[in-house]
Image (tube, rainbow, N blue to C red):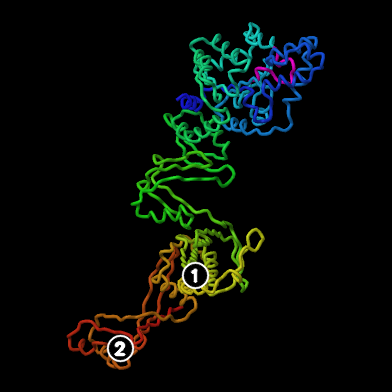
Amino acid sequence: MHKENLFQLISKGDVVLWVGAGSSLYAGLPSGNKLSEFLFDGLSIKEKEYINKNLLLPDLAEEIYRIKGNNRNYIIQKLKEKILLNNFLSTSAHENIAKIPHFRDIITTNYDQLFELVYRSKLNLIYSDHQIPYIDNSKVTLYKIHGDLSVPDSVIITKSDYDNYFGNKKEEEVLWTMIKEKIATKSILFIGYNLEDSNVSVIFDNITKKLGANRKESFFVSPNVPPQKLYHLSDKKIHYIDSKGEDLIIELIQYLKDNIKKDYENKMVSTEIYAEFLRNFNLKSDIEINELTNTIKNFSGLNGDTETIAEFVIDSTYPEIDKVIDASEGEFIDELVIDKSAFKNLDLRMEGIKIADLSDIATLTISPIPIFDKDVDVSFENGYELNDISVKVTRGGSRTKVLIEFQKNEFELIITIKENNFILHVDYRNSTLINNVSRQLQFYNAMNLLATGNTINAFSEGKLVFTSVEKFDRRILDGFKGLYDYNLFYLKYFEKLKEIEKEYNIRFSNIDINEVSDKNDIILNRIISKIRKEPIEEFFKGISFNIPLTERNKKLFADIENPTIKFAANMKKFTLHNQEFQLGEHDIHIVEPRILNYENVLKGIDEEIRIESNKEKILIKFKD
């Protein structure tokens, strides 16, 4: 209960961290007892005769100070020798604390420089009044209340130092006034102390004395404290948490990872602390700040890819449960979209930070990570080249998917090899809107070469990354045969567009791919016919029309065995792919015409005469 309460207070930034020597033992630094031994062992034999080596550190230091003629030099030099290390065994616990920007103020009785090492330039170091005017509020502030070894006069080590620490002189100091303000307005978390520490009682007693009953909650973290010794804490209204300090910090980080998103959305944490916490785990997010709530639009990595883990339970009755199972086992190559209704629970994390649960989503999209995702240049054996082609390769179990994109056209190749069975699936998707005929022709020419088995080499960043000489199985080439016919229509269509552009000095743009059709291909052929001054042959099913029974018409259709039928026509102005054309007058010749009902028209049985072509063809020739 106390731990949960503490974590909630830390989430709000309402806790001051108070750190003792126990928090630095893991780094290879000495405890108070070890420091006492080190100070005693450095004395001369004669000096040792006058000092009880079993004294607590402050009392021992006091005796050494006196025996040295009220000189602190020996003590300071020994402290530097033992504490100012060049190489620590580890700094992990302090690094973890530095990942928690919710701690804006840290108070320590330690002399070491572990916090300075892990925070680097993000720390205000305060151990005297003179440094206070230079505090940068964007940084964490470290109060070294027992001083800093770089300034010997600031160091508190002897019994006299401790006796004077909370004395009247301190009341006048700006530093102590600031510390009182911090601990009066925020809760205190003590780590790195045990109840046998000589200065713990002094600290607890004086905080109680100075702040009285109206002080905020305090928390004391230490492992395995016997129940009979806890009365000292409860008497001062300090909550005990049975844990190692470094373990508690790890639990705290996990708690913050679990709750930082919700805390920020509910305005429990500032934008600055939220953003810094994300940065400490290589993340950033786009946000929208509103009056009542904050909105998080997305998350992304600071340096490219991030570790993203989704843990969820899917209802076994979900229709696409097999696809979900495949995805969970890495057997997928396509995006998988799962509806919210499929989930029993969901936990989605990036770099360990919880970014979503069921309340946050409508659907969950899972995308495979490509094994290759780069732009390449391709050259074919006939010398044809294509540059800046996007190639993405994904692999899932027995399937490999190659997706090639150029000018928003896509060519997809899926190869499945399972139990000696080879399955090839080829898909081809045109760009929906085409703005450049020449570039589109590049794509169709490349597809044509690919479909006809031309050897290809692909280069990325100046290096050969693929060659079909080694990689193309004969079965793949056989599978391309269907691609050839499909691609040929588009290739020929755009070749005609290019010829028209050159003839009329125009450029087609915004071509809707849905308008690239058989119907419009017929119109293209007519334009090309006029350009080339060549007749064009078209399919002809037949024609029916009324005809006056004049002597001229009777004579015209009299030879029904070998009639010659020609019409004159005029094609009106029309628009094709956003360009206007007018082909004008042209003649239409019916190839091998036959008149089906001439006798019935003469007898008045049929009103319309019906003419068809034995070849089902007509010839159209445009006039100059």
Task: Find disc 2 in the rendering and name its residue.
Answer: 594
Secondary structure of residue under mark 2: strand
Q: Residue at x 54, y 59 (%)?
A: 393
- CA neighbours of label 1 inside 10 A, class few (<14), some (14 to 19), many (20+): few
Does residue 378 appear anywhere in the picture?
yes
* Amino acid carrying mark 1 in the image: Asn
**Foreground tag (2 vs 1):** 1
Task: Find disc 1 in the rendering and name its residue.
Answer: 420
Above or below 17: residue 253: below
Q: Residue at x 49, y 71 (%)?
A: 491
Q: Residue at x 74, y 15 (%)?
A: 153
Q: Is residue 421 left or right of residue 589?
A: right
The quadrant of the rendering that contains the N terminus is top left
Q: Nearer the viewer, residue 208 or 49?
A: 49
Please check the rendered image and state whether residue 155 is part of the magenta-colored stretch, yes or no: yes
Q: Nearer the viewer, residue 437 or 486?
A: 486
Q: Which quarter of the picture shows residue 281? A: top right
* Amino acid carrying mark 2 in the image: Arg
Above or below 156: residue 264: below
**Magenta span:** 143-158
Residue 66 on image: x %, y %: 77, 9
Please tell me whether the stretch drawn in magenta is mainly helix, strand or loop. loop
